[in-house]
Image (cartoon, rainbow, N blue to C red):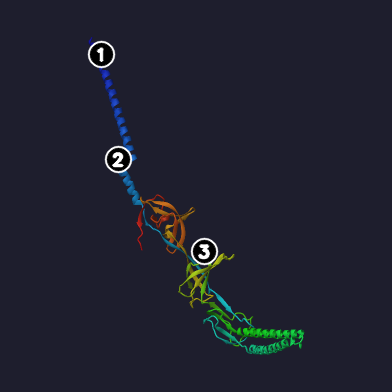
Amino acid sequence: MNYEATVSGSDLLSQEEISSRRKKRLLIAAILLLIVAAVAAAAYYFATGTGEGGTATKAAAAEKEKSQAQAVTVVAPGTTTVTRMINATGTLAARREVPVGVVGEGGRVTRVMADAGDWVKQGQVLISIDRSVQSQQAAAQSAQIGVSEADLRLAQNELDRALKLVDRGFISKADVDRKTATRDSARARLNVSRAQLNATRASNARLVVRAPVGGYVLERNVEPGQTVTAGSGMLFRIAKGGEMELQAQLAESDLATVSQGVTAQVVPVGTDQIFNGQIWQVSPVINAQSRQGIARIALPFDRALKPGGFASVEIKAGAIQATVLPESAVHNDNDGDYVFVVGKDNKVSHRRVKTGLVTSDGVSIVDGLSGSEKIVLFAGSFLNPGESVIPKMQKKK
């Protein structure tokens, strides 16, 4: 019995030991599972940046990005009035040039009473031509008028007497008709003589060459003693009223933007004087070879404006409201022009713009900007969209 009891006790201890070992193994497995879960949670915690550890990571990354950001100069350009200026060159000339020559038969010049650079009035005598022969012709025609008047009086008296005798039968009706015809012929000859004398006097009057208009004498081509005729050409050249102009040569595209009344500033070559003028005529045609046309700019008289001289001109061809940027701020690629804009988060973005006139102040932007943006002025070629920068506003001059 004792043996059986001993055996039975030994079996019971063996079962308890097996159960204890089994519980230990389960406990160890549970602990290992808890450790694995904790490690996974910690990994997820730091990977997602939640909590205080994530905030610190983000702050460190932001601080690192900030330390690597480059400083750039920016400007908020606003808008301004941009005046379109056209620069051109041209030739100075008289606005209305009047040539003066011999109108009649001409002759030997006896006096010249004007010179280049003089001012003359309309009707003023410029030259006198010898009229000795023409004066004698006028005297002979005047005498012929006297003869014709005497013949007319005689014919009229004979006709009057014949009319008194015809009723008494002493003279026939045919004799009266002949005397009437004689009287009419004498009257006609008198009219012819008077017309010839008037023609001679008019011709003699043209031997005195007068200024057809008042103005400034540009050129004189006659001297006393010279024989001049209608074929002698131009004796004087007069600028009517002294008015001058610049005949500016403009490109076809520029000519389309100007009109009558547009102001311009003219500077003759060799001087620093500026003359203000206005376009008074735009050429209706374009030169087929040069693709240019002429804008005629009226100028007041000044002795510094010499016809035939060369001058430069600056024409104001309208104005627009636009943003103006230095050329360093505007970039271009295959798709056109663009600028870099710094946003509120100090990151740059790529913005397409449409450029307009190029002035001494910079490039005008006609589309794409309101003028309130912060535009990167320099180093734009080294920036990429989305890159953080440290903007520094340009100081006003």
Circle 2 sits in a helix, a strand or a loop, which is it?
helix
Which residue is at a point 28% across and 24% down the rendered structure image? 23
Q: Nearer the viewer, residue 392 or 18?
A: 392
The answer to whether 318 is drawn above or below residue 138 in the figure is: above
Q: Which residue is mark 1?
A: 8
Quadrant the N terminus occupies:
top left
- The image shows residue 238 at horizontal and vertical percentages of 55, 78
Residue 106 shows up from this direction: no
> Which residue, as the protein is rendered here, is positioned at the far front?
168
Which residue is at a point 30% across and 41% down the rendered structure image? 53
Quadrant the C terminus occupies:
bottom left
Q: Nearer the viewer, residue 383 or 167?
A: 167
Q: First in sequence: mark 3 or mark 2?
A: 2
Circle 3 sits in a helix, a strand or a loop, which is it?
helix
Q: Quadrant of residue 136?
A: bottom right
Q: Nearer the viewer, residue 6 or 157?
A: 157
Is 193 positioned to the left or the right of 360 in the image?
right
Mark 3 to mark 2: distance in Å? 68 Å
The answer to whether 356 is drawn above or below residue 267 in the figure is: above
Is 301 positioned to the left or the right of 27 in the image?
right
Residue mark closest to the camera, 3 vs 2 = 3
Is 237 positioned to the left or the right of 10 in the image?
right
> Which residue, as the protein is rendered here, is positioned at the far left?
2
Q: Which residue is mark 2?
A: 51
Which of the labelled discs sits on residue 395, or is there none?
A: none
Is 228 positioned to the left or the right of 376 in the image?
right
